[in-house]
Amino acid sequence: MSNSQKKRLLQVENLSIGFSQYFKGTQKRMIHPIADMHVNIDEGEIVAVVGASGSGKSLLAHAVLGILPGNAITSGSILYQGEELTQKRKEQLRGREISFIPQSVNYLDPLMRVGKQVQIGLDRTTAQVQQDDLFARYDLKKSDGRLFPFELSGGMLRRVLFATSVREGVKLVIADEPTPGIHPEALSEILRQLKQFAKDGAGVMLITHDIMSALEIADRVAVIKDGTTVEISDVSAFEGQGDRLITDYTRRLWRALPQNDFDLEFKRKAEESCL
Ligand SMILES: Nc1ncnc2c1ncn2[C@@H]1O[C@H](COP(=O)(O)OP(=O)(O)OP(=O)(O)O)[C@@H](O)[C@H]1O
Ligand code: NI
């Protein structure tokens, strides 16, 4: 897709998420893991969301999908195709136009055969053929479809999760850590599939710890720290010593990658300058 055709698909502004919690039995308090988070995704664009564990990446995804727990209180705005994404609209779009590849295999139904789970949302008459096709694509045996989740390995379950997200007419794909525990061929298949979603015009939010994979396929990278967006940069800024990156935090993240083997003096100076 050329730039001139690209349209804004998702726009998250000033997102804050708090939880009311009981402590000491009866007293109530609020915690605010997310404050003033923002991110936007255009049609045909892959935006990677990276950040430390607990920084709020999954909560961002869950807020867009409308699957936050009941005690969550959110503020800010989430626009999808220029219109406010209300809870009702989230529920209508989820699993259809907006597809979710969850972080945990616990999202699968433990009591349903995995083949049936992959068929959810598919046209009845062609569901079996499509399932066979998806299983082949993700290196699963046809007979695996008759198994229950507990009978599959972690890597196989992740591939089943991926298969549940591939639907015709998908416009926004939210993939939360889709790659851990996946062997290299399946990893490149998953990255290829995410790229294909984007090529077909969908927007992709790729949440990951795997910055190298993210840089391989993403157009832009949003860096999240302590529940806030610290930077959104073009992937091209992740080169050399990261001089084109905006924040020291992101520069440090980039320089800390194993292949960016800068000399120690440089690392020390970089660290001092961010303290
Ligand atoms: N239901 C909840 N109630 C209270 N706090 C929560 C709840 N869910 C998440 N949090 C807190 O919000 C913060 C962000 O959590 P989140 O799951 O979004 O992190 P993450 O960036 O996805 O981490 P990881 O990379 O480990 O998956 C964490 O500190 C977490 O403890
Ligand atoms: Ni997470």
Image (tube, helix red, strand yellow):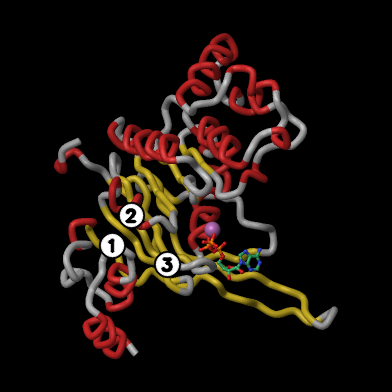
Question: Which residue is pictured at 16% across the width and 72% down the height?
Answer: 243
Disc 2 versus disc 1: distance between alpha carbons?
Answer: 10 Å
Amino acid on which the number 1 mark rests in the picture: Gln
Crowd around label 3: few <14 · some 14–19 · many ≥20 (10 Å)? many
Crowd around label 2: few <14 · some 14–19 · many ≥20 (10 Å)? few
Question: Which residue is pictured at 38% across the width and 69% down the height?
Answer: 229
First in sequence: mark 3 vs mark 1: 3
- Tell me, for residue 37, which label it has, or none: 3
First in sequence: mark 2 vs mark 3: 3
Q: Is residue 128 above or below residue 210?
A: above
Dividing the image into four quarters, tell me where ligand 1 lies. Answer: bottom right
Disc 2 and disc 1 in contact, CB within 8 angstroms:
yes
Q: Position of residue 262 (x, y in %)?
A: 23, 74
User: Helix, strand or loop at disc 2?
Assistant: helix
Between 124 and 252, the one nearer to me in the picture: 252
Between 255 and 206, the one nearer to me in the picture: 255
Question: Which residue is pictured at 47% across the width and 30% down the height?
Answer: 166
Amino acid on which the number 3 mark rests in the picture: Met
Return the residue at label 1.
Answer: 259
Q: Position of residue 206 (x, y in %)?
A: 41, 49
Amino acid on which the number 2 mark rests in the picture: Met
Disc 2 versus disc 3: distance between alpha carbons?
Answer: 23 Å
Q: Is residue 245 above or below residue 100?
A: below
User: Helix, strand or loop at disc 3?
Assistant: strand
Return the residue at label 2.
Answer: 212
- Tell me, for residue 207, which label it has, or none: none
- Residue projecting furthest to the right: 25
User: Helix, strand or loop at disc 1?
Assistant: loop
Q: Nearer the viewer, mark 2 or mark 3?
A: 2
Disc 3 versus disc 1: distance between alpha carbons?
Answer: 30 Å
